[in-house]
Image (tube, rainbow, N blue to C red):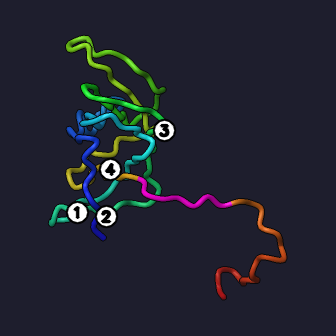
Amino acid sequence: MIFPPVYELSYVGVADAGVPNGERLLFRPTELVNVAQFGILVGRRNPDGTAVPFYDHFFWFGELVVSPPSWIIVYTGPGQFQETKLPETGETAYVYHWGKSHTVFHVPDIVPVVFRIGGVVVGQRPIPPQATPALSRGRP
C-alpha cells in the first residue's frame, strides 16, 4: 500500500545512531501544524525505498502546535518532554523521548517511518457476555 508523503514535517535524519542517550531523530516543521496528527514507526527499508514497519514500535507526539523555524527532536531513550531554545540560533526545539531501553537505528536498514493519522475508531469495554461469540482458543 502506498500512502501520500508527509510535507508538513521535514525529516532531517538520525543523529548519533547507536549512541545510548544520544540517538535522536531530527525534524523541522515546514508550516504551522499540530503534531498530534503524526506518529513514528520503526521499519526495515526495502531496496525500492519503501519500508515495512515492525510490530510494537510506535511513537505519538501528542497535542502540540509547532511552526517554522523550529526543531522537533525525538530521543529514542528515556526522558521528559522539554521545550527549549537552541543557543546557536534561538530557534525553538521541542524535545521528546521515546522511552526505549536501547538504541534503535544503529543498523542502516532500520529506519523511522513517519505517518499522518487519517482516521480512528475508539472501542469501549467491557463487552457484555451475551454479545460475545463463543470461541474455543482462537478457533471459530
User: Looking at the image, which residue is at 32% across and 15% down?
Assistant: 85
Percent position of residue 50, x then y: 22, 63
Nearest the camera: 95 or 10?
A: 10
Ranked by sequence position, the earlier of labels 1 and 3 is: 1
User: Looking at the image, which residue is at 66% across and 88% down?
Assistant: 140
Asked if residue 138 is positioned above or below residue 101 in the image, the reply reads below
CA distance for labels 1 and 2: 7 Å
Percent position of residue 38, x then y: 39, 46
**Residue labelled with disc 1:** 50
Secondary structure state at the residue bearing disc 4: strand
Label 1 neighbour load within 10 Å: few <14, some 14-19, many 20+: few
Secondary structure state at the residue bearing disc 2: strand
**Residue labelled with disc 2:** 52
Nearest the camera: 134 or 117?
A: 117
Nearest the camera: 58 or 99?
A: 58
Ranked by sequence position, the earlier of labels 4 and 3 is: 3
Amino acid identity at mark 2 = Val
- Asked if marks 1 and 2 touch (Cβ < 8 Å), the reply is yes
**Residue labelled with disc 4:** 114
Secondary structure state at the residue bearing disc 3: loop
Percent position of residue 95, x then y: 38, 27
Q: Which residues are magenta?
A: 117-123
Amino acid identity at mark 1 = Thr
User: In this rendering, does residue 26 appear at all?
Assistant: no
Label 3 neighbour load within 10 Å: few <14, some 14-19, many 20+: few
